[in-house]
């Protein structure tokens, strides 16, 4: 026997018992995105490496250590996208969608990061991502957050908390970075190794360190909110006011800095305590400088990405309702005549009831075997065709989940009988 080829670490097969939950998450999200005017865009999974290093930032974990980068046969350096925002901006610029226009766009699909796999952290994972372009004011920040709250509500996800912060303009942040560096240098002996390394390259990332001693220290660090430029402070105040008015609860977390360099002003994250250390289920923020940084005209922008696997895991933890995907009916057929008649009956039912989920037994065997399979399939009703029924265009109608007796019906009557079972 030849050797089995193993899957790649951190890249999951998502099996049929999990996909209904993902589909529900995707369907609800899509419907609400559409309701708020977002239009779908599909962008490639592979982009030039430079796109990510220029947007996410050279000294970020993603660009330094997590990208799947390779040379194609032409010698061009390409990268499997670690996130969608850079590709969305690139696509917007390549297709003239951004200049002087307002765009609300969404996309979804797999992202790739060479991280250490653990629960909730994978090397291939899915995001649902939305971006709005051309809107500088805080009202789009508020609308996006309200829209996300609505998505959680529709999904019946309750155990998430919204954290918000403002990172100000890059200039104000540079000033704050110096203040923070001074503070951290003065307490250098309390810093873990990773944070010491970041002290020079990216001190803001020290703020979201998970090392207990470092986390205790940064609780007393200067707050970025005390170093915002006036416009950013006003923007943040207005946003908070709007969220208060519409009744969205949030916590201001001045240590929320995000792991990508392109952000300015508003950043936000929905976190949960139900999933262990991988606690962020949806994150985003404003990135008003990125479009220009990638060669376009200055265009304000804001967006977010949901972590699909993490949200699905949270839905499972919270036991949120998911539409049933099991078959409504299972068609048992025994005998040569019934083989053909079964196929005809199945087609007749699919024609009449487009929402019907019907399994046609194609495995053969006697009534007992087929009924066992019908039961195992989760179907609510078995339709039983023997030679007699096949000859007279009738069929046995046998409810499987209660004690109701089997009845013998004409094919037309089955349609009517099945209809209430489809709800
Ligand atoms: P991010 O925080 O890197 O932001 O990722 C967004 C979400 O993707 C996270 O909150 C998390 O739920 C999920 N996620 C990230 N890494 C993994 C992983 N290795 N395994 C499973 N899930 C993961 C971005 O990607 C930005 N592009 C978001 C954005 C859009 N900002 C503006 N527009």
Image (cartoon, rainbow, N blue to C red):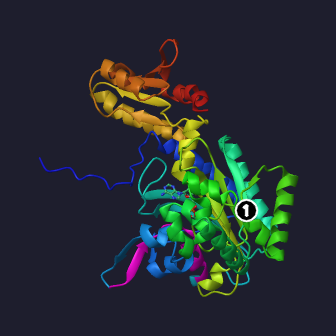
Ligand 1 located in image quadrant? bottom right
Q: Residue at x 55, y 35 (%)?
A: 324
Image side of residue 48 versus residue 243, left or right: left
Closer to us: 395 or 43: 43
Ligand 1 neighbours mark 1 (CB distance < 8 Å): no
In the rendered image, residue 197, in percent from the top left (x then y), is placed at 50, 70
Q: Quadrant of residue 291?
A: bottom right
Range drawn in magenta: 75-93
Corner quadrant of residue 341? top left
Q: Is residue 47 left or right of residue 131?
A: left
Q: Which residue is mark 1?
A: 165
Label 1 CA crowd tier, 10 Å (few <14, some 14–19, many 20+)? many
The image shows residue 274 at horizontal and vertical percentages of 58, 41
Q: Is residue 355 above or below residue 12?
A: above
Whether the magenta-drawn stretch holds residue 84 is answered as yes
**Residue at the spot 65% in from the left edge and 43% down from the top edge:** 155
Asked whether residue 212 is in view, the answer is yes
Label 1 residue SS: strand
């Amino acid at each position: 026997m030849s050797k089995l080829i193993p899957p790649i670490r951190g890249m999951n097969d998502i099996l049929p018992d999990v996909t209904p939950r993902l589909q529900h998450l995707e369907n609800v999200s899509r419907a609400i995105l559409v309701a708020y005017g977002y239009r779908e865009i599909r962008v490639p999974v592979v982009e030039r490496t430079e796109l990510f290093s220029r947007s996410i930032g050279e000294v970020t974990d993603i660009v330094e250590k997590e990208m799947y980068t390779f040379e194609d046969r032409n010698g061009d350096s390409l990268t499997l996208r670690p996130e969608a925002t850079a590709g969305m901006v690139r696509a917007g610029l390549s297709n003239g969608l951004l200049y002087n226009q307002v765009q609300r766009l969404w996309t979804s699909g797999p992202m790739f990061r060479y991280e250490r796999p653990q629960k909730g952290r994978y090397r291939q994972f899915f995001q649902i991502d939305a971006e709005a372009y051309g809107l500088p004011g805080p009202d789009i920040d508020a609308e996006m957050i309200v829209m996300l709250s609505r998505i959680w509500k529709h999904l019946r996800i309750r155990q998430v908390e919204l954290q918000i912060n403002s990172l100000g303009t890059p200039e104000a942040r540079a000033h704050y970075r110096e203040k923070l560096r001074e503070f951290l240098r003065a307490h250098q002996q309390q810093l873990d190794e990773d944070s010491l390394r970041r002290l020079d390259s990216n001190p803001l990332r020290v703020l979201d360190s998970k090392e207990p001693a470092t986390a205790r220290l940064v609780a007393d660090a200067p707050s970025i909110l005390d170093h915002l430029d006036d416009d950013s402070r006003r923007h943040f105040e207005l946003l908070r006011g709007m969220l208060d008015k519409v009744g969205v609860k949030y916590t201001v977390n001045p240590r929320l800095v995000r792991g990508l360099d392109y952000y300015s002003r508003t950043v936000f994250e929905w976190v949960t305590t139900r999933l262990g250390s991988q606690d962020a289920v949806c994150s985003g923020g404003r990135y008003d400088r990125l479009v220009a940084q990638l060669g376009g005209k200055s265009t304000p922008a804001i967006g977010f990405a949901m972590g699909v696997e993490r949200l699905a895991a949270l839905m499972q933890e919270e036991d949120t309702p998911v539409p049933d995907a099991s078959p409504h009916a299972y068609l048992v057929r025994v005998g040569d005549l019934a083989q053909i008649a079964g196929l005809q009956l199945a087609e007749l039912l699919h024609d009449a009831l487009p929402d019907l989920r019907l399994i046609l037994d194609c495995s053969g065997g006697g009534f007992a075997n087929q009924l066992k399979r019908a039961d195992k399939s989760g179907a609510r009703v078995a339709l039983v065709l023997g030679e007699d029924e096949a000859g007279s265009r009738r069929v046995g109608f046998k409810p499987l989940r209660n004690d109701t007796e089997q009845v013998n019906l004409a094919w037309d009557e089955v349609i009517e009988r099945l209809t209430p079972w489809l709800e």
